[in-house]
Amino acid sequence: MKRSVSSLFLVLAAAACGRGSGGSPTCGLAMLAGPSLITSQLANARAVLTDPPRGIPDSLPARVIEQKAGSGGNGAVIVGRDAEGKISMQFRGPSFPARGYGLLVVDDTSQRAMGVLFLDQEEPAGHPAIGTIIGGSTVLNLYGVRVDWASVSNPRCPLFGGSASPPTS
């Protein structure tokens, strides 16, 4: 496990440092630290979403984080609801993971959905899925977590790519 985490960090650092104007070592570290800090919140029961949040925009930025070199990247999700009120998302972009899970990231201050991380790893045990994400013929479970967005995202190196400004709800 430790080796795969180290490999993941090296792949992310290489990918982050090779990105256009945000390719600085600082951005490389931000691309490593941000997802790690976000996923660590799954250990905090008060931060885990047990129900789908209200007010999610129709579209959100997404970031695929895979352990294989040269894979991963940015995309977007189209957001909807199923008959039970759970979130149903359709992924738009390259390299949807064949396994893993999605993690809806919500700012704990504004309660605004910031984006979705796709992680190529085992699903979090003991947490309720708040929806699903479809990418091609693959369906992944969606979990949610609240984070202090200002402490996990560097505005000069936006975690979800594109503009440094947060999505509107």
Image: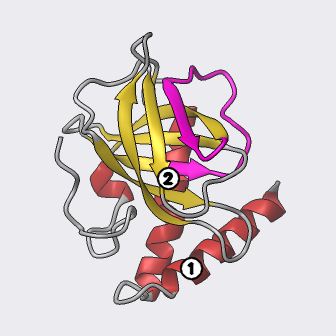
Kindly report the secondary structure that dominates the magenta region of the rendered protein. loop
Task: Using the rendered view, name the quadrant where residue 166 is placed.
Answer: bottom left
> In the rendered view, does 80 fall on the left or right side of 57?
right
In the image, what residue occupies the spot 50% across and 26% down? 131
> Would you say residue 163 is visible in this rendering?
yes
Q: Tell me the residue that label 1 is attached to.
A: 15
Image quadrant for the C terminus?
top left
> In the rendered view, does 39 fall on the left or right side of 126?
left
The magenta region covers 117-137
Q: Which is nearer the eye, 100 or 108?
A: 100
Report the amino acid beneath label 1. Answer: Ala
Checking the image for residue 37, the label placed there is 2
In the image, what residue occupies the spot 44% across and 47% down? 116
In the image, what residue occupies the spot 22% across and 52% down? 167
For label 2, the crowd category at 10 Å Cα-Cα, with few meaning under 14, some 14 to 19 and many 20 or more, is some
For label 1, the crowd category at 10 Å Cα-Cα, with few meaning under 14, some 14 to 19 and many 20 or more, is some
User: Residue 20: horizontal and vertical position, in percent?
Assistant: 39, 88
